[in-house]
Structure formats: structure tokens, C-alpha cells
Amino acid sequence: MAVAAVVMLVVSPRLYSENGAMASGIFYDPGAPTFLLKKSALDSTGIPFTSHASDKPFGSYLQQTLDFGPFKELFDAISAASNATIHSRGEAHITVITPPEFDLVLKPGGVTIEEIESIATANGIQNARLMPVCLGRFNGTLPDPAHSTDKAGFLLYSLVVADVYSDLLTIRRKIFKLYGEKGGQGALFQPEAFWPHVTIGYDRQDLFIEDGIYKGSNYCYAPIRTTS
Ligand SMILES: *[C@@H]1O[C@H](CO)[C@@H](O)[C@H](O)[C@H]1NC(C)=O
Ligand SMILES: *[C@@H]1O[C@H](CO)[C@@H](O)[C@H](O)[C@H]1NC(C)=O
């Protein structure tokens, strides 16, 4: 019985990731180890919603707040496996509306951060049902370094996440609806242009879509196995 339970624990996440790999074209680095993550890491039901509303430029955004504990363990394992020095943010979250989406599009379109937060909390942002996809890594130079402060290489790790029931996408679609009702230009906000992930660590700074970095399953580097 005990043996069977252990085998299930080890085998089923592996099957999940291999099936997922076939279905969605995930390519892992052949030399990458499998990293472990607590099964409960993406369950934030018991964690209060945190507001990120600010008058400062690019200070307002929407996030699902996660417990840092399991992500600290993942960070430590990645640090130990890599010879590079990487830094953690000391917290874990999934950005649902980015600072540029708010400052450059939604805010000028008349959508307030309070309206965004009220859509998010009414739709249970902290209860969003998510699954880990893989550990993503970028280790290289940016395609257009003129937009960055540095032309040298960057190293970045994130947990790529699947919004399996579109819980977070639904929030983005409702924000889009409000934006449209206020006369916003549809071309400027794409609810589906959304690659949920948890930033785990980086050598110098985090990188974003604006830098040319897409954090979907295209970004996968190493498999993630969930543990209880
Ligand atoms: C890390 O450094 C050690 C000791 O310098 C070396 O043996 C090992 O090959 C390095 N690992 C990687 C992944 O570069
Ligand atoms: C990142 O790439 C550089 C250059 O190819 C390589 O020397 C370095 O070992 C890589 N870093 C990691 C953590 O793999």
C-alpha cells in the first residue's frame, strides 16, 4: 500500500507533464533537473487580497498574492543547482494586470484601479485555480537592448502557471468589458495576452513583455514535480 502510494506520487505528476508537453509543445533543456514544488503552493484561498494602488507612475497593478514559503524552497533549490547568484523578491504573486497595461491603456481609458480591484475581488481572485506548468528560464541578451539599461546577459527564473479554469482570464475579460463600455479602444488591451507566472529569481532585474520576454510554455526550461 505504502509503496503504491509513493509510486503514484512520483508517477502521476510526471505523466501530467509529459502529456502536457505533447499537447502544448513544451521543450525542456535536456540537462535540466526536475524541481519540486509543494502541491499547495498555488492555492491562495486563505491569503488576503493585497491592493497595489498608487499615485506613482507604474505603481498600480493587479495581482493574486501567494504564500512565499513554497516559492522560497524552489528559489533555494534553483540557487543550489545553478552556479549563478540570483536574487528573490522575498514574496510571491501572479500579476494579472501589469503596470504598463494600467498606466498606458486602462487608466487613460477611464478605468480606475479601484474598479479593477472590485472586479477582481468580486470574482474571487485569491481563489483562482492554477496548476504549475514548468520552471521557465531566460539566460541571454535582450532582442532590443536599446530599451533596457544594459546590453549584457540576463538570467531569470519563473514558475510558468496554467490558469486551468480561466479564473484569472475571466477577470481580465471583465476589465476589458468595462474598458470598452467607457469607450476604450479594443486594439490597445488584449485580455488573452496573458501568460500567468510567478517570478522566482533573477541576477539583475526582472524582465517583461516590454523587454521582449514571453513567459508562456515557450519559456519552459525544467520540469516541475508537485509534492504533498
Ligand atoms: C558549478 O561549479 C562547479 C565548481 O566550480 C563545477 O564543477 C560545475 O560544473 C558547475 N556547474 C555548472 C552547471 O556550471
Ligand atoms: C548562461 O549562459 C552563459 C553563456 O552561455 C553560461 O556561461 C552560463 O553558465 C549560463 N548560466 C546558467 C545559470 O546556466
Image (spheres, rainbow, N blue to C red):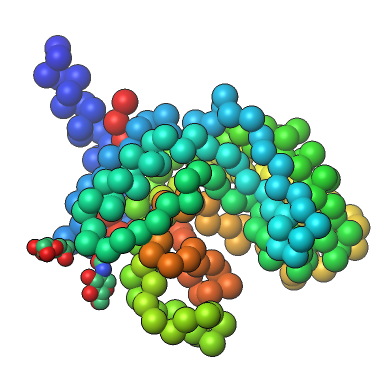
Q: Can you tell which quarter of the image residue 117 is in?
A: top right
User: What is the tally of numbered marks visible in this picture?
Assistant: 0
Q: Is residue 103 left or right of residue 145?
A: right
Residue 103 percent location from the top left of the image: 76, 64
Residue at point 39% right, 36% down?
70
Residue at point 76% right, 49% down?
53
Quarter of the image where the C terminus is located: top left
Residues 48 and 110: in front is 48
Residue 52 percent location from the top left of the image: 70, 47
Q: Is residue 132 left or right of residue 36?
A: right
Q: Relative to residue 123, is residue 108 depicted above or below? A: below
Residues 219 and 15: in front is 219
Q: Is residue 109 visible?
A: yes
Residue 218 percent location from the top left of the image: 40, 63
Q: Can you tell which quarter of the image residue 27 is in?
A: bottom left
Residue at point 77% right, 53% down?
54
Return the residue found at the far bottom.
Answer: 146
Q: Relative to residue 195, is residue 13 depicted above or below? A: above
Residue 8 percent location from the top left of the image: 21, 26
Return the residue found at the far top.
Answer: 1
Q: Relative to residue 154, is residue 10 depicted above or below? A: above
Quarter of the image where the N terminus is located: top left
Residue at point 20% right, 34% down?
11
Residues 133 and 50: in front is 50
Q: Relative to residue 92, is residue 221 depicted above or below? A: below
Locate ligand 1 by image quadrant: bottom left
Q: Is residue 17 visible?
A: no
Q: Can you tell which quarter of the image residue 141 is in?
A: bottom left
